[in-house]
Image (cartoon, rainbow, N blue to C red):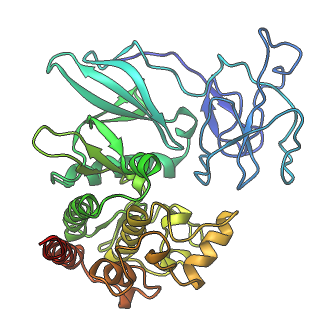
Amino acid sequence: MVQEASRATVCTECGRHLPAAARFCGYDGTKLNPNIGTTDLPGGSQLPKYCPACKKTYPVQATFCPIDAARLATVTMSATMPGESKHWEEVAVRPDLSLSVNLVGKTIDYKYQVESVLGEGGMAVVYKCFHKQMERIVVIKVMQGWLLSSKNSFERFEREYKITAKLNHPNIVSIYDVGFLNGNEPYIVMEYIKGEALADRIARQGDLPLVTVANIAIQICRGLQEAHSMNIIHRDLKPDNILLQEKSDRPDWVKIVDFGISHLAAGDAKRLTKTGRMVGTPEYISPEQLRDNPIDARTDLYSFGIILYEMLAGTVPFTAETAEAVLMKHLLSDVPSLTEYRDDIADDSPFGLIVHKLLQKNPDDRYDTATEVRLDIEQALNKTLLKRGAENE
């Protein structure tokens, strides 16, 4: 296991204990070491990043805000900070002082050789690793170091691997192992998916062929039905969390990932998010989530409807200059017709009707289960193929 000696440092603003290497508090943006400034930085300097949502500042190495998961923006010397922040000051951060230890080239738990970084999010850093004994590639997701003192973040990370481990389905990513770096930094070992995210496919190709859309959508429905049958609601379904695996026997094998903010629809599951705080991604969030109403499987089906629309149109139905404006459209605006983007799907066509039903504002007006959606998509695809065949005769 990777060993790294560390001492706790305390944020003077919120009192939280943070890793010794931390120079900014990941919770409120407070600069932890007043001796770090613009005058003692060798080799040039970089300004810290800030969160456009909460206006707090973070080190240049950070990508997402740990408070609201917003993507961080870079401050330039010629730009002024949007909004007011009592923690903001023009200080630079040494590039070698990262809140997260770079594990590339190291060995975790004597068997996982870390090869490269695959990505970084608000909760974790994802590494591509080689399992020495089993001689296969795996993925290791390590919790961000500055979140270790947050009980909720720790429990959310723990919940992700416990919930995902229960889901044994070919269209859901598999969990192999869990462990702790230095005795307190949790990590998850998952299967390595060779391919790309659905978000990248759409960004590269735009609207997708109807057969491809149906193939991907049917598999998403199968994975969702497995989760929903165990009363697990994903809550953050989006193209970034749909991986398209390259398999030798068939293209675009779907793997649903990231159950970090999933919700148990039944039982006495502990609530890890505060009432009134939005959980999810603005472009894919359901109206009931915005109203903080009880959620169930139909919440995921609304998000799936947005994904289906995006695959067909090449863009999400609701766009605006601000996240707040997008959220209001989810609550109040009608879904734009798919005929604005392609002429082979009319509003009253099988696929047009499926999208319309999935994106109803009232959950009672949507499909009840992912299986019902899948059956309608399969039937719609068959009708479309038969119609095309008849036209070509």
Residue 126: x and y, percent?
Answer: 41, 33
Q: Is residue 335 shown above or below 66?
A: below
**Which image quadrant for residue 234?**
bottom left
Instruction: Give the x, y percent position of residue 200.
Output: 42, 45
Residue 208 % position (x, y)? 35, 58
**Which residue is at the front of the view, 38 or 109?**
38
Residue visible at 41% across and 46% down in the picture? 157
Residue at the far top: name it.
42
Split into 4 quadrants, where in the image is the C terminus? bottom left
Q: Quadrant location of the N terminus? A: top left
Vertical position of residue 113 compared to residue 9: above or below: above
Left or right? Give the position of 278 relative to 343: right
The percent coordinates of residue 260 (x first, y second) are: 40, 52
Q: Considering only vertical position in the picture, is 307 above or below 85?
A: below
The quarter holding residue 311 reads bottom left
Number of callouts = 0
188 relative to 206 in the view: left or right = left
Q: Residue at 24% across / 25% down in the picture?
A: 137
The residue at the point 12 percent across, 37 percent down is: 248
**With respect to residue 367, does 388 lie above or below?**
above
Q: Is residue 277 left or right of residue 384?
A: right
Q: Residue at x 42, y 80 (%)?
A: 359
